[in-house]
């Protein structure tokens, strides 16, 4: 190694000898995947390891799935307000889904959990492929996602094997009982689920503006995504928390529209 930091060729190494046929030594050009606004290409990993993002026809509505688990309704309140934000972007539509409950009804009754909204269908893992963007909401359990949402992610093995979710943008929103209960760590520890699928984590950062910096009230939410404080369960989401959720929906819809229609 010379002082200049570069690698010095060995004096014993013979210089390369040019031959009459140099085309065989040249690397082959990567295979191009033509994509136009009139055709659809499935998300897939091709031979040259390039992830091809599905291109939607310009007249087709893009779908953002808002997938959540909510025991007492706090996460659900954010999800419904988030849908308003997504639907506010022209050409993008939000669809609400909940994940399956894993606790037996007798346990839920003892925990005084209210009944689920039957108008919101339960999502199966296979249906995730149909989404153009995803927002996952869940309450915290010791600084990480609730077991119900983790069970849902655990059921996505076939999608992982076939790389059906690679390249899809996704974000998180959460609920915690206290200010130090995991507003950030609950989202942070969930990023591993996206990473293994090759999904693109979309945090909101500080795009909400002044509402992220105000110290006038206790409020959930972080640069990772919207959030609500549940307290002992009786506290409902404040207007600031709901507005942040609406902003996140609008922000995600804008990202999805830019990705798939540019």
Image (tube, rainbow, N blue to C red):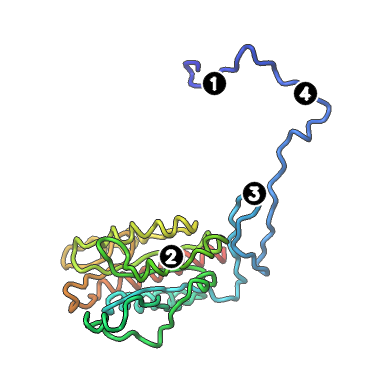
In terms of sequence position, does the residue under pointer 2 or pointer 4 come before the other? 4
Residue 23 image position (x, y, % from top left): 78, 35
Viewer-side label of 2, 4: 2
| Residue that mark 2 sits on | 154
How many other residues sit within 10 Å of disc 3, few (<14), some (14-19) or many (≥20)?
A: few
Residue 143 image position (x, y, % from top left): 26, 60
How many other residues sit within 10 Å of disc 1, few (<14), some (14-19) or many (≥20)?
A: few
Q: Which mark is residue 7?
A: 1
- The secondary structure type at the circle numbered 1 is loop
Q: Give the Cα separation between the discs numbered 2 and 1.
A: 47 Å
CB within 8 Å, label 4 to label 1: no
Tell me if 259 is positioned left or right of 72 in this view: right
CB within 8 Å, label 2 to label 1: no
| Residue that mark 4 sits on | 18
Establish if 29 lies above or below 111.
above
- The secondary structure type at the circle numbered 3 is loop
Establish if 74 lies above or below 11.
below
CB within 8 Å, label 3 to label 4: no
- The secondary structure type at the circle numbered 4 is loop
Residue 18 image position (x, y, % from top left): 77, 23
In terms of sequence position, does the residue under pointer 4 or pointer 1 come before the other? 1
Q: Give the Cα separation between the discs numbered 3 and 2.
A: 29 Å
* Total numbered badges shown on the rendered structure: 4
CB within 8 Å, label 3 to label 1: no
């Amino acid at each position: 190694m010379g002082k200049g930091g570069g690698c010095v060729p060995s004096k014993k190494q013979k210089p390369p000898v040019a031959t009459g046929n140099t085309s065989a030594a040249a690397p082959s050009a990567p295979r191009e995947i033509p994509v136009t606004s009139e055709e659809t290409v499935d998300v897939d990993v091709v031979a040259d390891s390039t992830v091809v993002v599905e291109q939607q026809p310009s007249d087709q509505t893009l779908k953002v799935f808002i997938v959540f688990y909510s025991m007492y309704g706090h996460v659900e309140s954010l999800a419904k307000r988030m849908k308003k934000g997504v639907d506010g972007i022209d050409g993008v539509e939000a669809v609400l889904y909940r994940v399956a409950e894993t606790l037996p009804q007798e346990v839920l009754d003892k925990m005084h959990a209210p009944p689920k909204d039957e108008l919101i269908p339960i999502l199966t893992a296979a249906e995730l492929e149909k989404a153009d963007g995803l927002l996952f909401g869940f309450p915290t359990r010791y600084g990480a996602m609730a077991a119900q949402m983790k069970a849902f992610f655990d059921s996505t093995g076939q999608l992982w094997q076939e790389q059906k979710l690679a390249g899809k943008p996704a974000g998180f929103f959460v609920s915690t009982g206290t200010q130090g209960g995991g507003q950030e760590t609950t989202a942070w520890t969930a990023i591993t689920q996206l990473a293994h699928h090759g999904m693109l984590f979309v945090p909101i950062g500080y795009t909400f503006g002044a509402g992220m910096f105000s110290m006038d009230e206790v409020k959930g939410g972080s640069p990772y995504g919207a959030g609500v404080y549940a307290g002992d369960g009786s506290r409902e989401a404040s207007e600031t928390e709901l507005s942040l959720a609406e902003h996140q929906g609008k922000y995600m819809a804008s990202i999805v529209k830019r990705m798939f229609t540019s």
